[in-house]
Image (cartoon, rainbow, N blue to C red):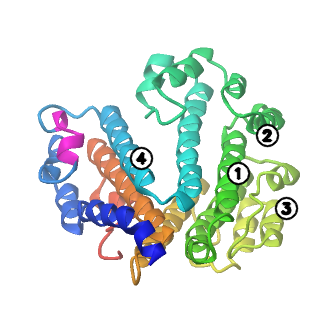
Amino acid sequence: MKRVSGYALVVGLIGALKSFMLTPSHYEMMLRTRDPSEVLIPLRETVYQRVLPEAFEKTLDILDVERRLLTHYYEVFHKVLTATPQSAKPLLEAIYGKHELNCLKTIIRALARNVDPTSAFKMIAPVGRYDAYTCKRILATGSVPRVVEFVEEDLREAILSYMAVFRRTGSTVPIESVIDKYAITRIWDSLRRLDNYDRKIVARLIGIETDTVNIMTVLRAKRIGMEAIDIEGLIIPAYYWVTEDVLVQAARAPSLSEAMKRLAETPYKEIVPTLSEEAERALFTIEIEFKRRLALESTMVFQGSWFHVGILLGFLNLKFYEINDLVTIINGKAEGVDIRNIRKALILHQGGRL
């Protein structure tokens, strides 16, 4: 009874929020619109009418739409966090921290591409400690190395240790991977403080996400030609279905295709194929398949009792992927991408899979 009463408030909230999520028919109507300016019309009777009121009345500003959608997600996350029982709050706060650091990663990519601060700010959805003021301050530095002035000391040291690799490769992959490792390690630290029941349920979702990040980190690092020893330093020291040994073998493989072969020998063999297409496209496809797998697992937590932290994380995953899909559809329509190719990039509701 204590568990039920502790989760009653947030479970009621999740039930209400989940009922507002989009259906396959919403996706289909958006996909089948011919005029890009009408892509949001199928959302008139949904929660997104309130999120994007002006978008229904004028030509789409894609960057503004993306920013509003992400801001909406952060607001939903905060509602869930506020209603979360005290015992589970550290986990949700650590996951929220990951989103804050994702904002920082967006800033880093803009700085690396020398995007002017005004244009770069339009690409960013400020969140938490990276509010609008802080984001503008970081962008004003015009320098990737100076990002360390705006992070915690332990993360600062980790980023600085890979700054030479960033300069050598000309890619933000090393820095972004350092940030991912830091964020997900903090999530695992908070996970260990949950009771056995909550921990067992949510460990599957976090474990699959960790496997995903580790695999994608190794593959991206191989693609840009990083040294094995540097790649190994980016591996998150938490393993679910992919062992440390397999990840190290992939990092030490002589090529990207050989690394894929090592990783194809894991339980994710259907997701990680041998390299049969251009590297960038192959990595994009693999990442989408991993997200679909996690979305499926997130859907499954709603079977049975809802009175556990897995319901919170499952919903937040699905809501985030819905936002991702909306951005994919809107951008695809604006750029005239064929409907079949847009479907290939969707995580939820690609055609009856979820």
The tag earlier along the polypeptide, 1 or 3, is: 1
Mark 4 and mark 1: span between their CA atoms? 23 Å
Instruction: Choose mark 4 or mark 3, whichever is in front.
Output: 4
- Callout 1 touching callout 2 (CB < 8 Å): yes
Mark 3 and mark 2: span between their CA atoms? 22 Å
Q: Which residue is situated farthest in the top direction here?
A: 140
Answer with the quarter of the image where residue 143 lies: top right
| Residue 269 place in picture, x, y as percent | 62, 78
- Along the viewing direction, whichever of 174 and 272 lies nearer the viewer: 174
Kind of residue indicated by mark 3: Arg
| Residue 16 place in picture, x, y as percent | 26, 62
The tag earlier along the polypeptide, 3 or 2, is: 2
Disc 1 element: helix
Is residue 59 shown above or below 28?
above
Kind of residue indicated by mark 1: Lys
Report which residue position mark 4 lands on. 78
